Amino acid sequence: MKRTMMSLIGVAVALAAVSGVAAVAAPDGGAKEAPGSGTRLPVQRSALLCPAPTSSEVGETTYTAFAPKGAAAGADAKKGTAKLLPAGTVRDVGSGDDGKSGKKQGRKGGKAQDSGADATGQTVAPRDTKPVVPLQEAGKPVTVTTDRSDAPALVGTADGTLAPGWTVQQTTSVAAGSGRGLLGLSCTTPDTTFWFPGVSTATDRQDYVHLTNPDSTPAVVDLELHGKDGSLTGSAGEDIAVPPHTTVPVLLSTLTTSPTTNAALHVVAREGRVGAAVQASDTKLGSDWLPAAADPAPSVVLPGIPKDATSVRLVAIAPGESDADLKVQLATPTGLITPAGLESLHLKSGMTTAVDLKDITKGEAGSLVLTPSDGGSKAPVAAALRVTRGKGDKQEMAFIPATRPVEKRATAADNRDQGSTLSLVAPEKGKDAKVTVTASAGSGGGTPVSKTYTVKGGTSLDIAPPRPQGLKGGYALTVEPESGSGPVYAARMLARPQGGVPAFTVQPLPDDRGSVVVPTAGQDLSVLTD
């Protein structure tokens, strides 16, 4: 009953968003009907949330904002605006003065304000109203850099021509300390539920989940950790209040008394909506952001394992009521292979399973593909990889969560003159993918360049992406499958070595959902609750 009610609420919210943000023209200037589903239109308003980047005194963060050119073409398209504003910050939940779990901090309370005391009586600094990373035109990225150790989380919206495909990339370089390394994250869209396989509460890790509320009403969030034997948290993560326009960081190790290396975090907003991302810091392997995995599904794809990966660890969970039996395959440049000794993988419902895949890519580009062993299973799965490059004390880690396919378009906003690698995978044998990759103009100048690639079905392709002619500054990469192309998934690796450490970060490139299907009048909405 609870799940049905949540589905109905989700439908109501989705329809309200669609009717409120859909523009009046399709991307090619004319509205088109999707058979049996309504009219597909470009979105007219988008929201993004960027967590506070780092508290390090030796960190530098670059924000890059971009919107594809011509995404909302048409005579009636509204001129767009896009901007981010600093969010207020609530003191860390679980790190109170008494050193205990601080369960009462951040808990549900009365109405919170944009400044002054929040819902729990804590102080929230007044919000700065000066826009950060304001984007003025489509097709040309804007970059802003800061070395502030107290740089705030950001909350923002884009509308009109800048809304479809609006992307903001947050890239932080930390030169030294326990959090050293390259941390990258595509700023997230607000939602009500997130899965983070691969988190840890072990003593060698410090993982924070950052919860950011974009709205003018409070959000109430539940956090639940799962380990190899099931739930780890009980009631410890319930009723966390996130005041309007603020961010709340929560130290995951304070939610459980059982230190666990390979855990999965489930974030559920019971009231309102939030953006969520996990910042993971390892005493030996540096730090990076762990983005939320794609919605649990029977089959998942994890694209972009670096060819020189020295260690790969898979953490997966079957969050539904049924166990899942999976076939594990690696999509290589020449085809799908089964890793030695891992013909199948059994996931118990509600419990995490971790598998050490070692140096699975063996010097070649690779992407992991998980599918039901019997072909007909509907048990949903959430999964992520922790990937390590380097050896000894010169190691660096990054994360690759399962991601959505690129259906219409996806973007990696922050690319430099050197160091970017684009990974494309067509996971279904016999279904080739033909993809156009466009390098935008540079933030300081340059001419866009496009190139088309064919990815054979069942293979993975790593490429040095095209660069704009006369490039100055950073640039964006846009990935667009051609009509009739087979399914394709994408990820971008950015490598920025630091004193012998192969610092890097990997961002999956899910479809940007720059268009929505508006139901036709009288359409049966019951199909949307499945």
Image (cartoon, rainbow, N blue to C red):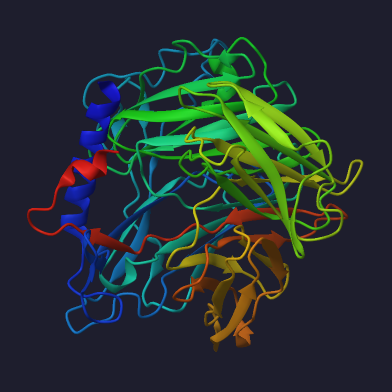
Q: Quadrant of residue 5?
A: top left
Q: Residue 137: horizontal and vertical position, in percent?
A: 37, 78
* Residue 180 visible somewhere in the drawing: no
Residue at image x 53%, y 21%?
Answer: 350
Residue at image x 16%, y 56%?
Answer: 19
| Above or below for 325 versus 330 | above
Position of 243 with respect to 404 (left or right) is left
Q: Quadrant of residue 514?
A: bottom left
| Above or below for 136 versus 332 | below
Position of 160 with respect to 348 (left or right) is left
Q: Residue 316: horizontal and vertical position, in percent?
A: 62, 33
Q: Nearer the viewer, residue 375 or 281?
A: 375
Q: Residue 45: horizontal and vertical position, in percent?
A: 26, 60
Q: Residue 40: horizontal and vertical position, in percent?
A: 25, 66
Q: Nearer the viewer, residue 311 or 365?
A: 365
Q: Considering the image in quadrants, where does the N terminus appear?
A: top left
Position of 122 with respect to 404 (left or right) is left
Residue at image x 72%, y 72%?
Answer: 418
Q: Nearer the viewer, residue 147 or 443?
A: 443
